[in-house]
Image (cartoon, helix red, strand yellow):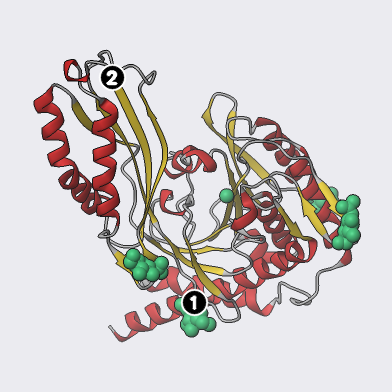
Amino acid sequence: MMILGPLLSLVLATSTTASQSPIADPTVLEPSTSKELLHLHRSLIEIESITSNEAHVGKWLSSYLRAKNWTVETQKVSENRYNLLAYGSKRETTILLSSHIDTVPPYWPYYYNETSGVIGGRGSVDAKGSVAAMIMATEGLKGKLQDDISLLFVVGEETGGDGMRAFSSWSKRPSSHEIIIFGEPTEGKLVCGHKGMLGFALKATGKAAHSGYPWLGVSANDVLVEALGELLKLREHLPWSTKYGNTTMNVGRIQGGVAANVVAETASANIAIRLAAGTPDLVRGQIIDALEEVKAAAKKQGGDLNIEWASEGYPPVDIDCAIDGFENMTVNYGTDVPLLSGHHRRYLYGPGSIFVAHSDHEALQRKELEEAVLDYRRLILKATEVRSKEQQGESEEQVEL
Ligand SMILES: *[C@@H]1O[C@H](CO)[C@@H](O)[C@H](O)[C@H]1NC(C)=O
Ligand SMILES: *[C@@H]1O[C@H](CO)[C@@H](O)[C@H](O)[C@H]1NC(C)=O
Ligand SMILES: *[C@@H]1O[C@H](CO)[C@@H](O)[C@H](O)[C@H]1NC(C)=O
Ligand SMILES: *[C@@H]1O[C@H](CO)[C@@H](O)[C@H](O)[C@H]1NC(C)=O
Ligand SMILES: [Zn+2]
């Protein structure tokens, strides 16, 4: 009985909520919601919030939510940078909707073309479209279900996720969240997972000399070029999977030397690997092995080659996506999803396309934004159903015991 009690009451609570029919008509967006959605989205975009400058948009958003009777808590992430956690009558909710309020640079102003229905500007897609749609979706739900939802808007997603890391390890983090919906541009589909990530820098050192007498020095550029040659060969042999395709490696930045007539003393390259299978440790091992001979040869000459790992990295991230009535896909970009610790059902959905997200023509259709509101509502309902079925299963098992 001790075990059965709380489980049964949870199941009952969920079915009571369902019978209240929390959405008037799940297929139509009320005109007033549509208008408010446009206003909210516009206001968010008009406040520049490039990573590390999120304070203004955060302040505006908390007053907006407070005016709608949300309780808003702030969590300090670093000087003048705050995550927002908003909820209704109770803090310990089952459902959490989360997205980010920072954007990549540079700032692009808001525009809305009523003829074409196109809304553009920095953040219109990534991820202020998700933020606005999540809020309007939740506002449209009624009663117990709305009271069981919290909103989390983090800073710093675009540069390594310090906001989500801070929330994940927050001493005041509610332990009740069982269903978490992340908002990032997914073209209105559910994402079944995304590739993992491993970033590193190669640092070659040599010894400067006059280019007329190169044997008096050691060229760090030569060392780096040889190392990169080995990595290009390795690139063809990295792990792959049918779900995510090939692991890819991008040499995004190379620097070395000071002038054509000087043997280069230092050289470096910054590299990002998107993992389609395996673990960061496995691929780290492959990289170290591939560079072993180049490093040994460089050292013998008086130079060196070292690897600096950008972070611990993470393997491919599988995400729940089995919900009726949604299309699904996988993506190659990283998100905050792996940074939130704990076991919960997690979903990733948002309006707009990643292909324009970080570009100078970041934009989406007003219709996509509106559909996202309806889809978030549908997703909340369906995910709640999946969870309560699961719990019914669990309590039946315990009855048999
Ligand atoms: C907020 O709550 C107050 C007090 O209960 C109420 O009078 C007001 O109408 C509410 N505002 C909104 C936007 O729901
Ligand atoms: C708005 O969109 C229409 C239809 O695509 C286009 O003809 C028009 O030039 C656009 N207006 C502006 C100001 O870009
Ligand atoms: C993966 O790499 C192999 C070998 O380079 C190539 O033939 C194949 O087309 C790639 N697959 C995808 C999905 O890009
Ligand atoms: C993803 O979509 C495909 C194609 O519609 C479908 O066959 C598959 O079952 C979906 N995956 C999940 C986990 O729902
Ligand atoms: Zn994003």
Q: Nearer the viewer, mark 2 or mark 1?
A: 2
Residue 93 on image: x %, y %: 55, 57
Residue on which the image places disc 1: 322
Q: Secondary structure at mark 2?
A: loop
Q: Residue at x 30, y 50 (%)?
A: 232
Query: How many angstroms separate mark 2 from mark 1 (CA)?
Result: 54 Å
Q: Secondary structure at mark 1?
A: loop
Q: Quadrant of residue 81?
A: top right
Density class for disc 1 (Cα within 10 Å; few <14, some 14-19, many ≥20) is some
Question: Where on the image, by quarter, is ligand 2?
Answer: bottom right
Q: Is the C-beta of the residue carrying label 1 under 8 Å from the nearest atom of ligand 4?
A: yes
Extreme right residue here?
A: 115
Q: Amino acid at mark 2?
A: Glu
Q: Answer left or right for 331 relative to 310.
A: right
Residue 202 on image: x %, y %: 29, 34
Q: Residue at x 67, y 44 (%)?
A: 71
Extreme top residue here?
A: 210
Is residue 385 positioned above or below 177 on the image?
below
Q: Amino acid at mark 1?
A: Ala
Q: Answer left or right for 224 relative to 270.
A: left
Is residue 356 positioned above or below 25 on the image?
above
Query: Camera-side residue: 297 or 278?
Result: 297
Residue on which the image places disc 2: 265
Q: Quadrant of residue 254?
A: top left
Q: Is residue 142 at least partly visible in the picture?
A: no
Density class for disc 2 (Cα within 10 Å; few <14, some 14-19, many ≥20) is many
